[in-house]
Amino acid sequence: MKRPEILFGKIVSREGGYAWAGWFLMPFGWLYGLLASIRRRWYESGDRQFHLPVPVISVGNIEVGGTGKTPVTIWLANRIAGMGYTVSVVARNFGQRTRACRVRLDNDDVRNNFTDEVLLLAESLLGRSSVYSGRSKTEAATKAYRGEKPDIIIIDDGFQHLQLYRDIELVVLDFASPFGQGGILPSGTLREFPPVISKADHIWINRIPSGMSAEWIKRRVSDYNWKAPVQFSRVKHTGVRLVNGKVMSGIPSKTVLAFCGIGKPESFRNSLEEAGIRLEGLEVFPDHHVYSKTDIERLRDIMEKTGGSALITTAKDAVKLYGIPDAEDILVQTMNLEVEGAVPELMNDIQNCIDIYRKRNKKTGKT
């Protein structure tokens, strides 16, 4: 029996005999989109959203699956912290830990309580921004404010988290499928109808392949939102390290076996091939997969049979490999975002927003 995410991928791409399922589910998608629109209108009308005494910026998207929101959140938090402001990042946790708390990477048990995206945020922002997580983003954001008194809070994957008021909406679109595939859930990957892009204050087009332009997406986006400034980014290979943290010099000279558990695994394959890393194959696990010793043993068996010299994975997967026997020498691809476009406009909006809140809080006596 095929895994649910594989079946879903075949349905949304209308592959072969699965096309009928996609067409059959389309009315349910329209209903889902209608309910999402009603829900958004209800929260945004009146005074139903929870307001914090500090500005909140949301980094979100309009489709399920990986659009690269978390790397954008990391880049943005580092950029704002580099301007001299204190930043707290909030992300929802689907792991064992349900109550909101600050994520501290001080022991291996902590890693069992949080999902890979939360751990990647905490690891990447260690020493620069605090990370708070829980089942409720509003609760986590409140704890972040009370515990840190930051200048700004960033909500990772916050576009549909309507309970909390956001001062700036940054919507991330993936170059490969900016408006999703197959329509609205469950017949496609969209969470809401595309016109909801009009709610964005800034639009970020991510994962642009080398040598290609995203101007065509920018023109299509303008049909829904012609006011929002647009940022562009490419994911750039910066090197290879081991799971244990040791940095490797250069790229592997022999072929390697790749594996990952991310929303769009082909993006990982493409980035490795663009970097000149030769692959024996790509083993795909479910998104947010929790790895075990058995998984690593099976991967090593496949590697030996295919003739690979090593295993390689993503930084998002690597945070779930700590503490697993025989996993420390697995290679990890390190990446950076190369960002261009309306970045000055985005940073000016953030700075102005922080200044407005500081003046308002000074008048009301809040700290």
Image (cartoon, rainbow, N blue to C red):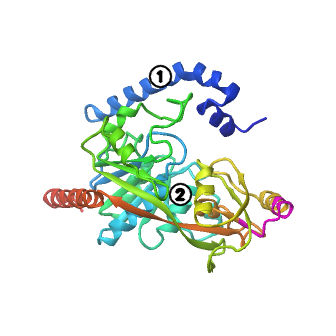
Secondary structure beneath disc 1?
helix
Q: Label 1, on which residue?
A: 30
Q: Which residues are magenta?
A: 302-311
Residue at 35% x, 60% y: name it. 340
In the displayed structure, 92 sits above or below 256; it is above
**Which quadrant would residue 24 be assigned to in this image?**
top right
x and y percentages locating residue 211 in the rendered image: 46, 58
The quarter of the image holding the N terminus is: top right
| Observer-nearest of 257 and 105 | 257
Q: Label 2 is placed on what type of residue?
A: Val
The outermost residue toward the front is 211
x and y percentages locating residue 78 in the rendered image: 39, 67
At label 1, counting other C-alpha atoms closer than 10 Å, the crowd grade (few under 14, some 14-19, many 20 or more) is some
At label 2, counting other C-alpha atoms closer than 10 Å, the crowd grade (few under 14, some 14-19, many 20 or more) is many
- Magenta-colored stretch includes residue 304: yes
Q: Label 2, on which residue?
A: 118
Q: Label 1 is placed on what type of residue?
A: Trp
The answer for how far apart the CA atoms under marks 1 and 2 are is: 32 Å
Q: Is mark 1 in CB contact (under 8 Å) with mark 2?
A: no
